[in-house]
Image (cartoon, rainbow, N blue to C red):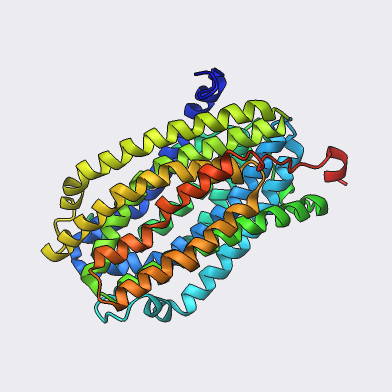
Amino acid sequence: MNRILTRDSNYYRDLLHLSIPVALQNLITFLVSFADNLMVNALGDAAVSGVYMGSQIQVLLQMFISGIGGAVIIIGAQYWGRHDTHNIRRIASIGLRFASSIGALLTLICLVAAEPIIRIFTDDPTVIPAGAVYLRYMCVSFLFFCITQVLLASMRCVETANIGMYISALSLLVNVGLNYVLIFGKLGMPALGVRGAAIATVISRVVEMLAAAWYVLRVDRKLGYRLRDVLHVDAALQRDFIRYGTPLVLGEIVWAVNMMANSMILGRYGATVVTAASVANNMNTLAYVAINGLATAVGIITGKTIGAGRTDLMREYARTTQIIFLCLGLVIGGAVSLIAAPFVSLYGGISAEASAQSLLFVRVQSVTLIGTCYQMPCLFGLVKSGGDISFVFKNDTIFVFLVVLPSAIIASYLGAAPWIVFACLKCDQILKCFVAVVKVNKYNWMKNLMRAGSEASA
């Protein structure tokens, strides 16, 4: 049994210690947008669809920042394996500069062209105005969101995961409170509807950015990050960041294109199916945040273990990870199937047809999440975080452009039912498992990404 599951208690301790706060932070971050979606539900299908479509650019931004934050964590965690905080600060600064530039650029684009952007996703005349209004206001939050995520990624490098959970909880409280006041016109404020939801999101993002900056700069003692670090340019580490970070960012862009194409394909079915997709994707995200938290924890453990040069121990960890997450996937899939109907019933303001479509979509996800729970910790937590970054990018690209999108487009043109098209869009979550089991058990993904201290700071 020792050859299947590791007896090293540090693995289980670190997995729980890191994954629980990261998962809770991801859950709370999701609940900020979920609160917009659920509270706007009272305004009808067009408003829900508008917020969903307006959020697609936020999804694109999250993918970019996820790639940059992932680079910070993957490279930084290996340096943390030898407790080299000097180079982790340099890596965080590089990530902060890239992320801030992307956030500012995307904000400018959305301010100028909100309505044309929404028209890319849908031609429904009832959805476009609400989506454009939501996007035009909500895009102001992009820069603050970028700064927050990189600062919290730098904390995860040094195994300080709790602070992200607390900051996200604060953001959620602010967002829900302001949603109630601004969407429905309480406490003497005018009822702003979709625009109020966007303004509430902006204010909550500003609050969380200020809280994250205060903690990292004033409270944290592990990393010792200071404002002057942002201005320091380390040419060697910047080359490493671009070299290893580019496949991560490109991989996230591929995934963002996939998500937006999903919206475009389903958007042609009309507001009812878009609303159903919005409801189902919220259910998917609810499960995904737990899986993502665990995968992130596995990634930090992997980076730290390889950075410390303990490759034999890493083999034990890899076998254990596969067993744990396959079993967990079966549990999560079963749980989603059981709560599908109660979850959909939360959206009492949507039409009966949208509710029925939502239930079918969630049933599909109860199957595909089993695959997500296995392949994501294996491909991200082990392979990508272990140093074989380009493999995951290539794998995702092949599945998205040669399997997922072609099958969904063909199904939609043949007049297939929306749930069949939705299943095509999610099929890669199962198919990637076959790739993951072969790749992980070859153990050729363990690579050292670090430079010698003198070379990195030259």
* Residue in view at x 64 percent, y 47 percent: 72
For residue 59, which quarter of the picture? bottom left
Horizontal placement of 302 versus 368: left or right? right
Q: Is residue 264 left or right of residue 78?
A: left
Displayed quadrant of residue 276: bottom left
Q: Residue furthest left?
A: 352
Q: Is residue 84 above or below residue 3?
A: below
Q: Position of residue 58 (x, y in %)?
A: 45, 62
Residue 319 appearing in the image: yes
Quadrant hosting residue 39:
bottom left
Describe residue 319's horizontal placement relative to residue 414 as left or right. right
- Does 318 sit above or below residue 42? above
In the displayed structure, does residue 170 sit left or right of residue 180?
right
Name the residue: 40% across, 40% down: 290
- Between 376 and 245, the one nearer to me in the picture: 376
Q: Residue at x 54, y 49 (%)?
A: 149
Give the image location of residue 124, x and y in percent.
Answer: 27, 79
- Residue 20 seen anywhere in this rendered image of the structure: no
Q: Nearer the viewer, residue 370 or 167?
A: 370
Q: Position of residue 324 (x, y in %)?
A: 44, 31
Q: How many marks?
A: 0
Residue occupying the point 52% across, 46% down: 436
Query: Residue 287: horizontal and vertical position, in percent?
Result: 35, 44
- Of residue 269 and residue 430, the one placed in the foreground of this image is 430
